[in-house]
Amino acid sequence: MENNNEEHKKISGMYIPPELYLNPKLTLTEMYLFSLIKDLSTSEQGCYASNHYLSTRLFFCSEQTITNSLTNLKNHKYIFIEYNKTKETGNKKIKTERNIFINSDYQTLYLPLITAYTENVNEASKDELKEILLSAYNKIIETTTKFYNRDEHKNLYDIYNNINKEDINKKDINNKPSKDGLTTSDEVVQSDVNNLSGKVRKRYKDDITSYSPDIQNLYELWMNLGSPIPKHRITSKANHTALCALKKATKKFPSDKIGDAMLLYHKVISSAQDYKLNIKAPGHLVGLNEFFSFKLDTLTRIDKNNVAYGIQSWFEECSKGELYMERVYGKHKVEDEQPEITTALKKYWKEYISKEVPHSPGDEDCFRLAAKRFKEFMKKNRNNVALYDNIDVKKLPRDSKYIYEAIISVTDELHKVTPAWLCSDKMFRKRLPIYLIDQGMMDNEYDDIERDQSGLVNQLYDMYGG
């Protein structure tokens, strides 16, 4: 049966699920082969590509490698194979046409691998993490061999619950302290049994007073930030993970930098409506346990349309400063109705005020509003004879420099000038008209213009000065 049909020619790409790449017993070729089979599978027929076809699609590896890889994937319950025809060769019957199907249960079967990884990735060293994953893998193989039947889906969660988390916990690795000095032995972790469900729940009894003053202060700062910042129960694993992450962070960064990042994150997430953030979106509102690094399950829920996609952590983002957060994540309150004038105002800022143009959302709004008000000012006064003779209203971007010249005419302290000066009422009622009159470009008979969007003008003025 020829497999090079149109369906097989359309390959969208290869995504390796964590249930495979965390498996210490799979090769990279086997992981890619699984992804290729999943891509080629149809809803009813599965994947019916030949070994030759698969080998050409998979870096031109040998057909024998494909055969071995299929066998290993099948033994690990990731796939199952059904043969439809056989042919006789001498005294032997050889199975020919086949269909390869992805086992829809593989995610549940290998869930303990993900659990083992997420619970220990922030604490264990690389070698320890390998041992933890291997321990989890061995337990999975043991239980699936005993209990799993893909025709009896009811057994799936029984299998998962039969995997004793004590066997894959880091404390089983020689029962020694972790690399960062935080022990996970029975001195820190205790177990409680829920009398209703019979499930074992671990209790962590971290003594915050045993940590350095910097860690204690930062921990207390986070816990007192207020809504909507999540708080962790003192005996929870999330709280234990948070302390571990905090201890590692203080070894790399100054405590004041961490504290400033925490305060900025609280400021931003508390005003999510002013930013491109949504506290209900995955990865936007995090606890201290994820402030320095997202959990694996959180990362899997952050898609490409999420503003948190691709970032390392909110600590890293917030440590870049408030202007960065406002520029990257802020929402603008003013539409840019006169983009050419706005661009010109930024250009003239470099010439008259400073080589560095302010770029926060609030500053950008001031530039946009100044451009709009400048055009309205010039349009309203175009019939003024002196103004008409000296200023071409069709070249407003060029003539917007008069705003800066009006500022320079009244102050030498340019370091105090902010973009809010450009759009303020004082600019268009006093500074600009007086400058133009002094320069002979406007008659003394100047009528004060009406306030435009005064609420927004005053808000920007109060926020950014001017």
Image: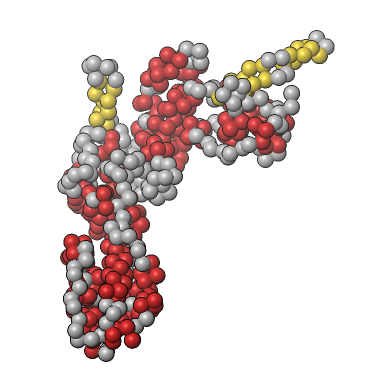
Count the labels in the image. 0
Q: Nearer the viewer, residue 236 or 411?
A: 411
Estimate the x, y position of residue 193 in percent, counting from the top left. 25, 20
Identify the residue at horizontal 32%, vertical 83% (top origin): 388
Identify the residue at horizontal 28%, vertical 85% (top origin): 385
**Residue with the most extreme right position:** 90
Estimate the x, y position of residue 250 in percent, counting from the top left. 29, 53
**Residue with the most extreme top position:** 91
Q: Nearer the viewer, residue 6 or 122?
A: 6
Estimate the x, y position of residue 168 in percent, counting from the top left. 40, 29
Quadrant of the frame with the C terminus: bottom left
Relative to 396, say whether 440 is above or below. Answer: below
Quadrant of the frame with the N terminus: top right
Location of residue 258 by image quarter: bottom left
Location of residue 100 by image quarter: top right
Q: Is residue 319 visible?
A: no
Identify the residue at horizontal 48%, vertical 18% (top origin): 144
**Residue 187 shown left or right of residue 341 in the figure:** left
Image colouring: secondary structure
Q: Is residue 15 visible?
A: yes
Estimate the x, y position of residue 124 in percent, counting from the top left. 39, 40
Q: Nearer the viewer, residue 69 or 268?
A: 268
Location of residue 11 by image quarter: top right
Identify the residue at horizontal 28%, vertical 66% (top origin): 369
